Each structure stands twice: as C-alpha cells, then as structure tokens.
Amino acid sequence: MNRIPVILDGDPGHDDAIAWVLAFAHPEAFEILGAVSVSGNAILTKTTYNMLRILTLLGATDIPAAAGAERPLCGEPSPAPSVHGQSGLDGPVLPEPGFSLCGLSGVELMTELLRESREPVTLAPTGPLTDVAALFLAHPELKAKIGRISLMGGGLLSGNWTPAAEFNILVDPEAAKVVFESGVPITMAGLDVTQRAYVTPEEFEKIRAVGGEVARVVADWLEFFYGYHRALGYPGATLHDPVAVAALLRPEIMTTRELYVQVETCGEFCRGATVGDFYSRSGKTPNVTAILDIDRPAFVELILDAVRFYK
Ligand code: RIB
Ligand code: CA
C-alpha cells in the first residue's frame, strides 16, 4: 500500500483527537505532512493549544503545526462547550505542548505542503471547513494537488445542531459551499454514518485495558464525551471524526453512495443543511462519495488497534 500524504485540519475536540490517534497509528498508510487547527468546538486559541497537546501525547512533535482560521468566512465563532467542555478537550490531564507552532498561518502551511508534495495530497478536515475554503479562495490552482478531501461534516437526513444542519457545516456554511463546489473529490462522513459509529462504555474499558498512556487518555476522552450523548439517550459516544480517517484506511467496512450534494447557505430553517440529490433531479454529476453505513464492530476494532500501536 503506497503511503498517502495527508494534511490534518480540525477543531479538537474529543473526536478530532481520537481521529488523530487513529491517523498517527498508521505510518504504513499515511505520511502526515502537517496539522492545522480551526475555530469550531472551541475558540482558535483553545483548539490550537489542544492540537499541540495531542500531537505531543502521540509523539508527533516533528511535523509542522499551524493555527488556522479564528472565525468563519461569515459570522462569528460558535463554540460548543456543552459537548467538549470549556477547554474544548475536557477530561484527562494532557502533556503540555512539547513543540511550537511552525510560524506560518494555516493556509500558508497547507500551501507550502501542497506545493512541495510530489504526490496528490489528501486533506482530512474534521471541523468547520473554513481553512480549506480559504486555501481554495487564495490558491485555486492548488486544488490540482489534492487527490481527495475526506471530511467529517453534514447529514443527508438530519442535523445535530439544528434540525437541518450538522455542527461543522453550520459553523461555516459559506466555507462548506466553496469546498463542496470545488470539484475536488470528497468523501463525506456525515451524521448518516457517524451516528452509527459509536463506542459503548463497555468498549471504553476494553480500550483502557490495552494499557499505556494513550489508551488511558482515549478511554478518559470517551468517558467525558459520552456524558453529552448519554443525556440524549445514545448507547455510546459517537465518534464522528475518526470515520473520516477510517474511510481512508478501511473503506471496505463502509457503505457508500455517489451523490450530488449541495450546501444551503440561506433559509430560515435550513442554513447549513447538506442536501443530497438521491433521485438525480439536479442533472448534476455527483461531487461526493457519501458514507451511509459502517460495520461498527470493525470500526471499534480499528480504534482498539490504534491504541495498541502506542503501547
Ligand atoms: O457534528 C460533529 C462534529 O462537530 C465533529 O467534528 C465534532 O468534533 C464537532 O466538530
Ligand atoms: Ca471536529
């Protein structure tokens, strides 16, 4: 399997953090070129601090990291402390950052990495799409250097932050519209699949039992993150963001459909909705590989294998 060059972009965030645990556990599959933080679950200073702490925990202090967008293309940040806590990554104590930001902005770092790469690069955004949109608006020619965007965002059947919109898309619908209309191939891990990609409290303890610091931290993250889901009656913590990474590793455990998807940026009730053309009424060529289902036990095993990597 040739290693895929990957740029991570997220708003850690418990599930972003576990997506990155998964990504760095597969050096045989991924060459992680860099990581960029974005405002989303928490304000940018917090997601950036969390990014550096996660990378330090994972021993990934040798890759360039940059702070991305402080606010959406339009409007103001809308953090979610009810889900991820005031820090954006409440729960276990984490190491202090063992390295510093690279000195470039998020767009500057992504631009440099794309220009330097000899292979098509995969972007794995797991937060609002502000950084990716800003990159495309500033350097549209660099779309040609991107092989695929494997993103967590959207929901074809419903939202989770409004009835119609999923959080990542709702925070920055204008950015999402730019990305979905970019022509770059997109794998969409929306709520349709991520609501099924949950880990149960019993499985938290299987993860903890692997032993080692990363296993303990991941189990503690899951325990904190599940607090929000338990109140809503979920059987476990829904690991949204790791599905976007798992789709690059084990596509065979997922059910997908090629679909034309548009992003609603107006609408009294539907701003931020991702609208899938299931009956090809638009006459438009599909722009998205939409993930609709997942083999949940196989997904959980992937997470277990990832924490074993760090032991
Ligand atoms: O709706 C779920 C998404 O919003 C996840 O990426 C989570 O981290 C938050 O960013
Ligand atoms: Ca996220």
Image (cartoon, helix red, strand yellow):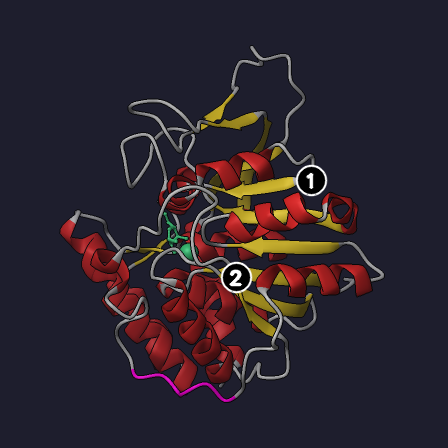
Q: Reply above or below: 136 against 216.
A: above
* Three-letter amino acid code at the position of disc 1: Val
Secondary structure of the residue carrying tag 1 is: loop
Q: Position of residue 123 (x, y in %)?
A: 63, 54
| Residue at (41, 75) in percent of width and height | 49
Q: Is residue 289 visible?
A: no
Q: Is residue 266 magenta?
A: no
Tell me the residue that label 1 is attached to. Answer: 184
| Residue at (39, 50) in percent of width and height | 197
| Residue at (50, 89) in percent of width and height | 98
| Residue at (41, 35) in percent of width and height | 155
Assign the N terminus to one quadrant of the image. bottom right
Q: Is residue 9 left or right of residue 121?
A: left
* Three-letter amino acid code at the position of disc 2: Gly
Q: Is residue 167 left or right of residue 285?
A: left
Q: Position of residue 199 (x, y in %)?
A: 33, 59
Q: Reply above or below: 44 against 274.
A: below
Q: Depth check: 124 or 290 in front?
A: 124
Secondary structure of the residue carrying tag 2 is: loop
Question: Which label number is shown at residue 68?
Answer: 2
